Amino acid sequence: MSDLAGEILPEKMAELWAEYVQMRNRIAKTRIDTDASQKRIFRQLLNLSSDNDKRICSIAQSIDFKWRGFFEPKNDYQTDYKKRKFEREKAIEAAMPPEVKAEKEKEADPEERKKRFRDLIRKQAKEGKAYAQNLVRKWDNPETQRQEDVRSQAEIEEELRKKCAEDVTKGNFKPHTGGFAPVGSIVSK
């Protein structure tokens, strides 16, 4: 397996692989007798994911459930995978130089992302993109936006009144006064 796996086969995966092969050999129909069959099955594992933690969890899951193939980790195995991934990322972050950490924190800052987005939109507006120009106009004149919102709300209410009046003239329902609809106020067609 070392020639196929290269350096991606950590100790934990090598142990689980040996256990997986034993499990498959105990199942009569699906024995792994030859090196070629072992390589084919190992390629399935390699094709599953490029993440060793996901591969380890998938092997463990296949062993526990006596599955012949490899699948995405599910339930407890998914949780285990997420823990492993978090711990690995935490270790990588701890090994980072302080300058890189500061840069990552700056990128993760929501205000900084918002600023970069606005700069990008303003650049697109200068290039003549209509959507970007409309956004910049709204950002520069928030009062205009509020007027548009109020006008659109008034237009919506007027449209609703017209539809109700049209329904009344068509006889779809009878108009009423007061807060509650009287019994029989809705007439079927």
Image: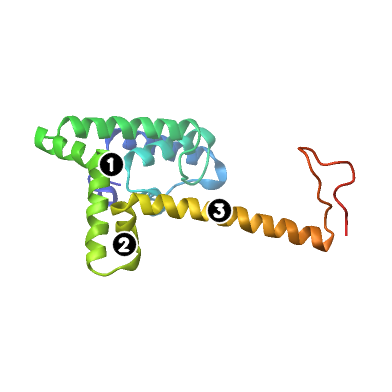
Given the image, on which type of amino acid does mark 2 rest? Ala
Residue at 43% x, 31% y is 79
Decide which of 20, 140 is in the foreground and name it: 140
Q: Which residue is mark 3?
A: 154
90 relative to 26 in the view: left or right: left
Q: Which residue is mark 1?
A: 9
Q: Is residue 174 above or below residue 57?
A: below
Q: Residues within 10 Å of mark 3 (few under 14, many from 20)?
A: few
Residue at 50% x, 55% y is 151
Label at residue 185: none
For the residues bearing labels 1 and 3, Cβ distance under 8 angstroms: no
Q: Position of residue 33 (x, y in %)?
A: 44, 47
Alpha carbon of mark 1 to alpha carbon of mark 3: how far?
67 Å
Alpha carbon of mark 2 to alpha carbon of mark 1: how far?
50 Å
Q: Nearer the viewer, mark 1 or mark 3?
A: 3
Decide which of 183, 51 is in the foreground and name it: 183
Quarter occupied by the C terminus:
bottom right
Q: Position of residue 149 (x, y in %)?
A: 47, 52
Q: Which residue is mark 2?
A: 132
Alpha carbon of mark 3 to alpha carbon of mark 2: how far?
27 Å
103 relative to 83 in the view: left or right: left
Given the image, on which type of amino acid does mark 3 rest? Ala
- N-terminal-most mark, 1 or 3: 1
Which picture quadrant has residue 36?
bottom left
- N-terminal-most mark, 3 or 2: 2
